[in-house]
Image (cartoon, rainbow, N blue to C red):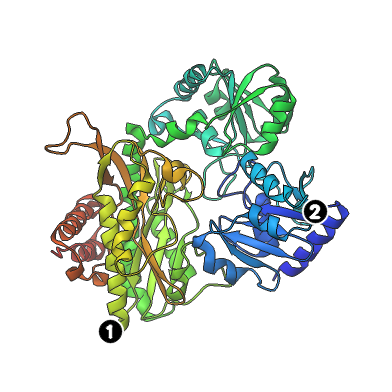
Amino acid sequence: MPDHHDRLVALRRQLVQDGLDGFVVPLTDEHMSEYVGAYAQRLGWLTGFQGSAGTAVVLPEDAAIFTDGRYTLQVREQASADDWRFVDVPQASVAGWLADHAADGARIGYDPWLHTRAWLTEARAALAEKGAVLVPVDTNPVDAVWPDRPAPSDARLTVHGDQVAGANSAAKRAGIADWLAEKRADAVVLSALDSIAWALNVRGGDVDHTPVALAYAIVGSDGTTDLFVAPEKIDDAVRQHLGNAVRIHDGSAFAGALAGYAGKRVVADPERAVSAIFDALEAGGATVVPLRDPVVLQKALKNAAEVAGHRAASARDGAALTRFLRWVETECGKGGQTELSAAARLLAFRQDSGMLLDLSFPSISATGAHGAIPHYHVTEDSNAPILPGQLYLIDSGGQYADGTTDVTRVMPIGALAKEQSAEMRDRFTRVLKGHIAIATAVFPDGTTGGQIDAFARRPLWEAGLDFAHGTGHGIGSYLAVHEGPQRIAKPDYPGAAALEPLRAGMMLSNEPGYYKAGEYGIRIENLLLIEERVVAGGDPDRVMLGFETLTFAPIERDLIEPALLDPDELSWLDAYHASVIAVIGPLLQGDDAAWLARKCARIG
């Protein structure tokens, strides 16, 4: 077992050697990625916290971990309260906490390859009140005390075929060039890994469960592109695919190349490009234009091939999940199964298709109290037996060449006690009502995710309940399972994603939930496609939008309280289950097909 206390002590010693009075450790990489390679898991190595979002601050006599509502319980289980304060965001901020706890005149270190300029501006302003300053480091002090830090992945790039991409790379780069002309800019830096993968129609294996490669790209106003990547990651097939218009350079040359744009207008995304990129461009004499990476929106608007691919991927994934849910119902109540064994069984069902390339994220296989941790990550240490009387939550997804999936279902294990069942059925049905409210929403073009988030929460609010995460996130096309810029979340969700206008062609998850700490968790998640809708009698000049449900797997009928559903909600549920049978029924046989028919029988 690693001693995380000793690691904290070692880091503090290193800070003294470096002349620093503190250091900020975010969970990200040089590309501001959500999921990162093992080499960049500094927060987990230092603290023991295994969530996918968070930041630590280390001071000489104090230290804190900052996490959002998804990880409130998890961080307290995995990191020691003897070493760390636990701070909830967005109620508090790293900058504000530093201003309150750093010593007067303190020198707080940061890695300029791991922070945005916006964060630096906020933190500098907060520290200035105490005469404290932020100090950029050339070498990350965590790396200096991490003796067995993994090397970055050396996985090779692969070609993502035009038939599944729906457009070739030349056309995509031409679109970026047109955008640059509109903005009167000479080039754009693509630092987000999924933007590079999408623009060049390549995929990689450098981040677990996200098929991207560690690289940078600079696209010029004529569409030609400089790709910075470790040369051993490029084979002849990829080189031929990229063509002469994409110049390949060693990844180590990227920082120096930024100095070659003197007198040019270069776009860098203030949300996705780190401070070091802005610094290098400005030092080289470029005028930095702080605009969102143009690929972000282009990538979010799925084309016909991507939508068709996702439908195919969802069907095979739904069939695998349905086989798994039947297995849970028939086997887990007998005893002998655990969170890890169940996750392994679902993986095997997905692999049976012969088309699974990876999971889209580590499966959240959570029974009982672990289900109340929204982003629970089962490990050998936390692995719990699945026992009768519990609710079992499985949130999982697959990576297929034609699509990325993400779905959550909840199953009761064996018989539930009467009192327990009544509460669980009430909560489950309220979550279902919120899910249906989003699935059936109709709204004007340009509506934001923040405007419709309350639809999912109202049935819970009416009972004095809520959930502490967003209702929906975007999803990639054989790319990141969490993709921007769109999101369904409360308007004050960190960043601007909840304020992004929703547009036809975007995909989103629909995943309201309820979590009773120490007892159980409930979440129902499907993926949705935004499409145009015609509303009878509506304003003919107003474009209206709605959702098409893309995910097909039964919603557990034994947890539904029909009396809480109104006639329209019952009709939606029956119609949804009829669609489940139509879409995945042909992919199932024997007992699996019969079980699905029973689970999808009419309730209304």
Question: Which numbered tag is attached to residue 418?
Answer: 1
User: Residue at image x 83%, y 56%?
Assistant: 14
Is residue 3 visible to us here?
no
Label 2 residue SS: loop
- Where does residue 200 sit, x and y in percent of width and height? 52, 29
For the N terminus, the image quarter is bottom right
Q: The C terminus appears in which quarter of the rendering?
A: bottom left
Examine the rendering and report whether any part of residue 166 can be seen: yes
In primary-sequence order, the first of circles 1 and 2 is 2
Q: Residue at x 78, y 66 (%)?
A: 61
Q: Which residue is mark 2?
A: 106
Local packing at callout 1 (Cα closer than 10 Å; few below 14, some 14-19, many 20+) is few
Q: Is residue 437 above or below residue 3?
A: above
Q: Residue furthest front?
A: 129
217 or 238: nearer the viewer: 217
Depth order, front residue of 289/27: 289
**Which amino acid type is shown beneath numbered disc 2?**
Ala
Q: Secondary structure at mark 1?
A: helix
| 250 on left or right of 418 | right
Expressed as whole percent of the image width and height from the top left, the position of residue 23 reads: 74, 54
Q: Residue 325, relative to residue 451: is it above or below?
A: below
